[in-house]
Image: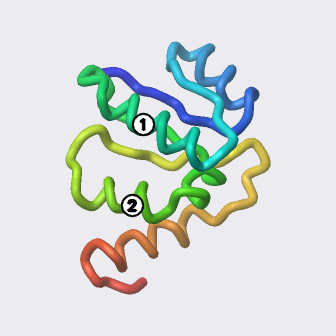
Amino acid sequence: MKLFCISDNIDTRMGMRLTGVEGVVVHTRDEVLSALEQAYADPEIGIILITSKLIQMCYHEIYDRKLHQRLPLITEIPDRHGQTDISANIARYLNEAIGVSI
């Protein structure tokens, strides 16, 4: 299984590339959704890494896939500025998935 990175900046993309993780840099909502479709179409990709900013841009579509599709796993990674609260996103995801509020 391979990892695939969908990033909103070249720095994250290059850092992932140095570790052997392929990916793309996107900036618009349509580009994000297109990159997700391409990643889902590749049976070798098991984990999609996507930056927090892009998760927020396509929140409903991404979490719908997380709730209803087993693979590939979508994992949120902080963007280079690290200004988002990932724990709040996880809590929101749990609330939607199983109705537990933490």
Q: Which residue is painted at 38% across and 36% down in the image?
A: 37
The mark that comes first in sequence, 1 or 2, is 1
Disc ID at residue 35: none
Q: Are marks 1 and 2 in contact (CB under 8 Å)?
A: no
Disc ID at residue 48: 1
Q: Which residue is painted at 51% across and 18% down in the image?
A: 22
Secondary structure found at label 2: helix
Task: Estimate how packed mark 2 is, as few (under 14), some (14 to 19) or many (20 or more) residues with alpha carbons within 10 Å.
Answer: some
CA gap between label 1 and label 2 equals: 13 Å
Q: Residue furthest front?
A: 30
Task: Estimate how packed mark 1 is, as few (under 14), some (14 to 19) or many (20 or more) residues with alpha carbons within 10 Å.
Answer: many
Q: Based on the displayed image, in which of its 4 quarters is residue 25 positioned? A: top right
Looking at the picture, does residue 29 appear above or below residue 96? above
Identified by mark 2, the residue type is Tyr
Q: Based on the displayed image, in which of its 4 quarters is residue 9 positioned? A: top right
Identified by mark 1, the residue type is Ile
Disc ID at residue 63: 2
Pick the front one: 98 or 29: 29
Residue 33, position as x, y percentages in the image: 48, 44
Q: Which residue is painted at 48% across and 37% down in the image?
A: 34
Secondary structure found at label 1: strand
Q: Residue furthest right?
A: 81
Q: Quadrant of the C terminus?
A: bottom left
Residue 93, position as x, y percentages in the image: 40, 69
Looking at the picture, does residue 15 appear above or below residue 51? above
User: Image check: 53 left or right of 59?
Assistant: right
Looking at the picture, does residue 53 appear above or below residue 38? below
User: Image check: 102 left or right of 29?
Assistant: left
